[in-house]
Image (tube, rainbow, N blue to C red):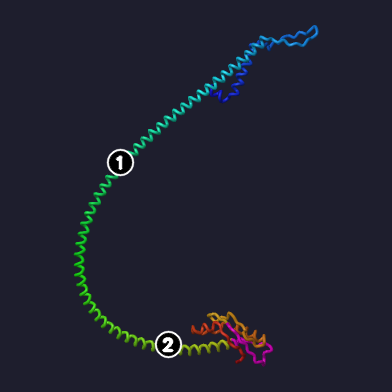
Amino acid sequence: MLDLIRRHPLGFTLAVLMHVAIVLLMIFGLDWLNPPEIQKPTGQVVQARLVDTEQFARQKEIKHKTEKRQTEQKHRQEEKKKEEQQRREVERKKQLEIKKQKEQKKKQAEQKKKEEQRKKAEAEKKRKLALKKKEEEKKKKLELERKKKLEQEKKRKEEARKKEEAKKKAEAKKKAEAKKKAALERKKKEEAERKRKAAEAKRLADQKAREAERQAQWAAERDGRERDSVTAAIKRKVQNSWLRPPGAAGRDLQATVRVRLNDSGSVSLVRVIKPSGSSAFDRSVVSAVNKADPLPMPKSPTLISEFREFTFIFRPNK
């Protein structure tokens, strides 16, 4: 109930005032259903207002009581609210104190646990240090014994090494002398063999050079003969394919022509590079070369590249 009043104070006040008004109406005995009958005055109407002092006093007393009751009720509500707030504050402080005590106990327990762990760790640390010290002393003792054995072994090995080294030196000296002697013998034999091979290589090289020279001379002579033969055959074939153009009779005309052939001798290009002075004659020469297609080709691989593209002078009957 108090929570409802605190949430809606205005509504609660209006409800109280409405109930007070209903009570007042019931006290005064107003009859709303049967209003009094108004009598018409017979004489002169005098405007007057009758005041009931007792009724006014009652109304004033009721109002005073109502206001007092409301004030007391409001005071009680405020006191109750204050008490509730104080109760809640006490409860809150109590809960805080409980929480504080729990946290303090928890903290003390954690501190106690940490202290126990610290002591345990310290004891473990001391135990490990003692064990480590013992192990180190043991290792130190073993290391001293090992070093002593190593020193003795080293001394023994050094003596054996010196003996072996002296033995090896003697053997190495003996081997070196034998090797030196064998090397001298081998060097003499190698030098003699080198000279013999050099003389043989020079003889073979001279013989090969003479043979190559003879072959080159023979190939040059052969290529020269074939070159002349092919050139003459080309000129003959072109001459046989040539038709004298009108106006060329009795004139000593000649044209220089560049011809390009493929591997089979087929003409791929023919062009007059030095005209004769007569365009008709030049055209007839080009036509004769095309008619003579394919032209003769040499068999020698060396000459084939020469005749892939060549130049010749065409003079009729020359």
Which region of the structure is painted magenta? 238-259
- Secondary structure under tag 2 reads helix
Where on the picture, by quarter, is residue 36? Answer: top right
Q: Where is residue 53 in the image (x, y as percent from the top left)?
A: 68, 10
Query: Residue drawn 25% across and 80% down?
Result: 180
Relative placement, left or right, of 122 versus 104 is: left
Question: In screen coordinates, is 69 left or right of 175?
Answer: right
Query: Which percent across, then down, holds residue 4?
Result: 55, 23
Q: Work out which quarter of the rendered image holds the N terminus and state it.
A: top right
Identify the residue at image location x=28%, y=83%.
187
Residue 253 image label: none
Q: Which residue is drawn at 23% across and 51% down?
A: 137
Secondary structure category for the residue under label 1:
helix
How far, Cα to Cα, is label 1 from label 2?
A: 105 Å
128 shown above or below 267: above
Q: Position of residue 121 (x, y in %)?
A: 31, 42
Dot 2: few (<14), some (14–19), or many (≥20) neighbours within 10 Å?
few
Would residue 141 appear left or right of 302 to someone viewing this image?
Answer: left
Which is in the foreground here, disc 1 or disc 2?
Answer: 1
The local crowd at label 1, few if under 14, some if 14 to 19, many if 20 or more residues have their Cα within 10 Å, is: few
Residue 275, above or below 84: below
Q: Which mark is residue 212?
A: 2
Q: Mark 1 points at which residue?
A: 120
User: Eyeballing the image, is 306 above or below 133?
Assistant: below
- In this orientation, which residue lies closer to the viewer: 170 or 124? 124
Camera-side residue of 237 and 141: 141
- Callout 1 amino acid: Lys
161 and 82: which is toward the camera: 82
